[in-house]
Image (tube, grey):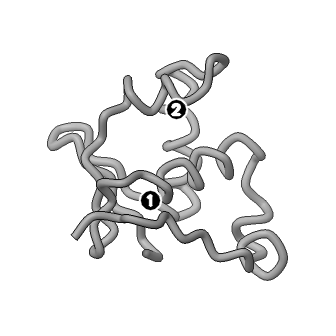
Amino acid sequence: MANAVGMIDEGLWRKDKDFQRLPRLAQCTFCQVLSQKDLDTAGILTLHIDLLAKGCDELTVEQLRADFEVLEQHRFVFVDYETDEILVRSY
């Protein structure tokens, strides 16, 4: 089943110290991933990095890759560029 609503827990901003330590742009990228309509209930999203980059006029594919690297280092997501999938760990 697809992600019809894109629920983002407001506790990320007030209670999740790990999330609060992330750089601002990585936080935004995480919320962008969580709000994608094809994020499934297992937390897996097909990676269409070019389409994600089109979500903001100031965003580039390179910046997204850098954000994904930070999010992986902090264990929020795992990105598999060979299968073009993202796993959201806490979903």
**Which residue extends farthest right?**
14
| Residue 62 in the image: above or below residue 20 | above
Q: Residue 41 at x, y = what percent?
A: 29, 74
Q: Is residue 72 left or right of residue 28?
A: left
Q: Residue 89 at x, y = what percent?
A: 42, 71
Q: Residue 75 at x, y = what percent?
A: 51, 65
Instruction: Tell me the quarter of the image containing the C terminus.
Output: bottom left
**Rendered image: mark on residue 56:** none
Amino acid under disc 2: Leu
Q: Residue tagged by mark 1?
A: 77
Q: Residue 24 at x, y = what percent?
A: 77, 46
At numbered mark 2, what does the secondary structure look like: helix, strand or loop? helix
**Nearer to us in this view, 82 or 12:** 12
Question: Which residue is at 49% across, 26% downward?
Answer: 53
Amino acid under disc 1: Val
**Which residue extends farthest front?**
4
Q: Which image quadrant for residue 12?
A: bottom right
Instruction: Tell me the quarter of the image containing the N terminus.
Output: bottom left
**Which residue extends farthest left?**
83
At numbered mark 1, what does the secondary structure look like: helix, strand or loop? strand
Question: Which residue is at 48% across, 32% downward?
Answer: 65
Question: Which residue is at 84% across, 76% downward?
Answer: 14
- Label 1 neighbour load within 10 Å: few <14, some 14-19, many 20+: many
Q: Is residue 91 left or right of residue 87?
A: right
| Residue 16 in the image: above or below residue 61 | below
Q: Is residue 47 left or right of residue 6?
A: left
Q: Residue tagged by mark 2?
A: 64
N-terminal of the pair, mark 1 or mark 2, is 2
Q: CB atoms at circles 1 and 2 under 8 Å apart? A: no
